[in-house]
Image (tube, rainbow, N blue to C red):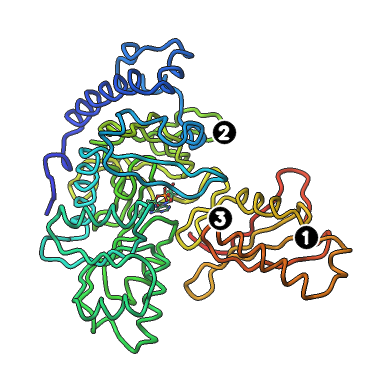
Amino acid sequence: MYWNERYECMSQDELRQLQWERLQQTIERVYHNVPYYRQRMQEKGLEPGDIKSLDDLQKLPFTNKQDLRDNYPYGMFATPMSEIVRIHSSSGTTGKPTVVGYTRKDISTWSELMARCISFGGGTKEDIIQVAYGYGLFTGGLGFHYGVEKLGASVIPISGGNTKRQMMIMQDYGTTMLACTPSYALYLAEVMEEMELTKDDLKLKCGIFGAEPWSNSMRKEIENKFGILALDIYGLSEIMGPGVACECAEKDGLHIFEDHFIPEIINPETGEVMPMGSKGELVFTTITKEGLPVIRYRTRDITRLIEEKCNCGRTHVRMERVSGRSDDMLIIRGVNVFPSQVESVLLEIGETEPHYLLIVDRIGNLDILEVWVEVSDRMLSDEVRRLEQLEHKISKEIETVLNINAKVKLVEPKTIERSEGKAKRVIDKRRFE
Ligand code: DLL
C-alpha cells in the first residue's frame, strides 16, 4: 500500500530529527556555495552555527522569485554546472524566467517523490500511465515521466494537446492512469463524449491532476465523467516541480513530503510565522536538494496546514487545496500569467493608452482570456481595418511572450473603471471554491 513506508509513516520525533540533520547540511551548503545566501545571512549577522534548532529557521531571511531572477540564470545554484544534469524553467514573470537546475541525486529524489504520489492513487508497476502534462522546460511532463519509470509502471509520454489522439490512445493502449491539468481532464471528457466514447470504453481508474487551482466540484465532475478517483498534486519549479505535496485516497488535504521540504505558513503582509492551522502564505525550505537548495521560499500560494493524523496512516502534515495567491498571478490553461506581462507587451507596442483589463472566464472547460485596452479617440476614428490590425498585432505579441491565446478588444477611452487604490487589472470569472 505504501511506496516507502519508512519515510511516509515516520514518527514525529524521527521526522523532526531527520529534518534537523538535513536542514543543517542545507544551511552549510548554501552558506559556503551560494554568495547570495552567505551575504543575506551576514547582513543579519548569522552564521550556520547560529541556527541551533528547527525553530531557528525563522531567523533566516525569505527568498523570493525576484531573488532567483536577480541571480539569473545560474547564480543560485549550489553546485558547479558539471554536477547539473537537467535544467527546467518556470514561466510567469515579466522578462526573464526562473531557471532551476538538478543534480543526478535531485532527479533521483524527484522521481522517488513522484513515484510516491502515483502510488497514492493506487498506481503500481502494472499500470499504464498517460502523461498529458507538457514536456519541455515545464516541470510537469518530465517530472511525472521519471516518477512513472521509477515506479516501474509504463509511461505514455504523449505531452499536452492533440485531444482526439489522446482519447484514441487512452482507449487503444488501455491507459489506467491519467496525469494532466484538471481543466484539460475536463476538456478530454468533453472530447470523449464528442467521439461517442463512454467511460466504459476506457480502463482508466485514477487521475492525478494539478498545476492550477481547481475545486471539489470540478473533482466530482471529472470523477463522474471518467468513473475514476481524481487526486490533487501540488508543486512548483523553484522547489522541485510536481510532487512537493499530493493527496492520498482520503482526499482530505495534500501530504507535504516533509522528509524533503519544511513548510511554514506566514502572514503575507507582515512575514510573521502563523500558528499551526492558520490560513496564510505557504513558505518552503528544501532540505535535500543539491543543485538549487532554497531557503524559506515564498510561494505566494494561500493555504492552511492540517496537523491531525490522516486515516491513511501517513504522518506527513497535510495542506488544504490552494485557495488563492497573495500576488496577482493567474493560471490560464496551465500557463502562469502576471498582468504585468501583458502590460509590458502593451507598452512595448505603444499604440494604446495605459489602461487595460484582463477578463478570464471558463467557457465549456476551456479558460478564455480577453484583454481590453483603451485607445485614444483619434485612434478610434481611424478605419476599422487599422484597428483590427492593431488588435491582431497585440494578440500575436501576447501569444509570443506568454504562450497563450488572447482575444484583444480595443475600447473607448474611460471604458475601464478607474480605481483610487490599487488598479483592478483582472476580472476572474472562474470559480475554484
Ligand atoms: O505547476 C508544477 C506542477 C506540475 C504541479 C504538474 C503539479 C502538476 P510552476 O509552473 O512553477 O510549477 O507553477 C507553480 O502553480 O505556485 C501554484 O500557484 C500553482 N499550482 C501548482 N499545483 C497546484 C495545485 C508547476 N494542485 C504554481 N493547486 C504554484 C493549485 C497549483 N495551484
| For marks 1 and 3 on the same chain, the one whose residue lies earlier in the sequence | 1
The residue indicated by pointer 2 is: 269
Furthest toward the bottom, the residue is: 196
**Which quadrant would the N terminus be assigned to in this image?**
bottom left
421 relative to 289 in the view: left or right: right
The residue indicated by pointer 1 is: 374
Label 3 sits on a secondary structure element that is: helix
The answer to which of 154 and 137 lies nearer the viewer is: 137
Name which residue lies at 31% across and 53% down.
Answer: 252
* Residue 132 lies in quadrant: bottom left
Are dots 2 and 3 in contact, CB under 8 Å? no
The residue indicated by pointer 3 is: 401
- Badge 1 amino acid: Glu
x, y percentage for residue 217?
42, 66
Alpha-carbon neighbours of circle 1 within 10 Å: few (<14), some, or many (≥20)? many
Label 1 sits on a secondary structure element that is: strand
| For marks 1 and 2 on the same chain, the one whose residue lies earlier in the sequence | 2
x, y percentage for residue 242?
32, 50
x, y percentage for residue 197?
31, 86
- Badge 2 amino acid: Glu
Q: Nearer the viewer, mark 1 or mark 2?
A: 1
